[in-house]
Image (spheres, grey):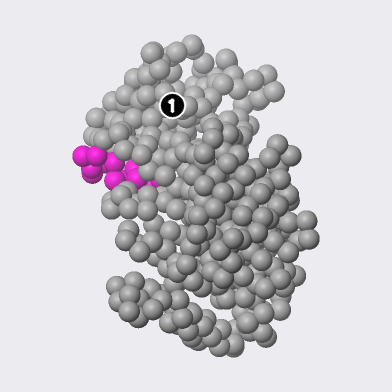
Amino acid sequence: MQNVRNGAITFLLCTLLLGWGVPLDAQLESVEQLKKQFPNPERGIWIDHFSGYNQFGEGIILTLAHDQREYRGIVQNRTNLKIFMVEGPWKKNHLGAIVADTNGNRIGTLRGGIRDSMFRGELRIDELKKSQALELKQVSRFTTDLPECPAGIAYREYYSKDRQWWMSLRYFEEGSATGFVCHVADSNAAWFTGRCLDPDCRKLEVLMHPCNSIWKFKTTLIQSDDQVVSLRWKSETDSLGRDLKFSIYRSAGFKCRSETHLSLQANSRYLWFEKRNYKKWIAQMLKGWSDRIYLHSLNSLDHNESYTLDFVPSWYSDYFISGSILSTDPDTKSVSVGLLNYDFRQDEPFSLDQLFEKNSDYRTFIEQHIYDVKTEMCNPKRKDLYEYIISDPFSDWCLLPTGICFSSKWHPVYGEYRILIPYHRFGARIRKNGPFRKMI
């Protein structure tokens, strides 16, 4: 393999080492770099992906591209993380190629054939003096774009006509939804979960949970054809309630990804924006989660199980996304909650610390405020519930138009509770040039 290609090969290999296994930003860049190895890529490049094992039980991935004249390819050993380049003349369904190391030096050969969506062949590395027998199954091709999710998956945001009420909705494909309602005038908020009552999910029965309270009530949310949403709102002192109407303000699209690790399925759904660093952040997150499932599949007797990673935004503004990331832990099978907070202006995730001035007492203030609200929420006579609420740190958080919302861990008996601290209560503690400096 000619040394003039070394620079491009080295870049490609570095890209693969950082992002292989996730068909997102890094994966797409690696495929594009592979295409550039051909002298006339405009004539068309065909790319196939194969995955399987050698006779030593090591996971192997083969990406093979051709222009009906030459083969270019990449072999990756997922067990020891070694990567090799492949180059040879094209012959339909047959491969006889040389193998090069990361410096472009020839180190072996790869021979084999493609039949019935399988690649069967032999990889020989000269210095090892033994061959690896490969049996790899063809997998779905990566494309230059990721598939859109089913229509039932969506994020939508609404305002009332007087802009005093705000609502977000996160629809799920299984016929359910969750969201928030905020009353801007008095900095109050509530969150809800609901189930669709019709196939198009235009009518939902929802259970509303006002923040800073253990009170809750059922109501109905109805969306008309012109995307106006009607909701009956109640309070602890107003059992009859009043009808609210919201008009759609914005929406955000999701991308879906599905991959198989042996007999285990990993499905992810996430908000998608054409921002380079954001896509890299997504790719890194999904790779870490996907690799955990892959390692679990190698040492597990589980079969035909499905794992899910899901973005649940609470608020998508012009400046940031805030919410939670729900993912299945491959070892415990339980759902863990991660924080979803990404600043579009800085093009990076942000933490709670970045919202406040460095030398302020914001942590002490938050802890004291949460404790005060806890003691007001629950009557000590309900000992079990009281002890659960008091002992939970309410450490998960998200941003809403009216304040920062802190959440308890979900409990199978007591459910979940949330405490909202309005922005104005923080006063000068809020960082003047922080992620929401223009929002409040």
Of all residues, the one furthest to the right in this rendering is 162
Residue 341 visible from this viewpoint: no
Question: Which of 375 and 265 lies nearest the eye of the viewer?
Answer: 375
Where is residue 165, by image quadrant? Answer: bottom right
Describe residue 27's horizontal placement relative to residue 133 as left or right. right
How many numbered discs, if any?
1
Q: Which residue is mark 1?
A: 139
Where is residue 253, by image quadrant? Answer: top right
**Secondary structure character of the magenta stretch overall:** helix
Q: Residue at x 64, y 64 (%)?
A: 182
Residue 310 position within the rendered picture, expressed as x and y whole percent measured from the top left = 48, 48
Of all residues, the one furthest to the left in this rendering is 301
Q: Amino acid at mark 1?
A: Val
Residue 238 position within the rendered picture, expressed as x and y whole percent measured from the top left = 59, 67
Describe residue 251's horizontal placement relative to residue 337 as left or right. right
Q: Residue at x 78, y 56 (%)?
A: 161
Question: Which of 343 and 430 lies nearest the eye of the viewer?
Answer: 430
**Which span of residues is magenta-colored?**
290-302
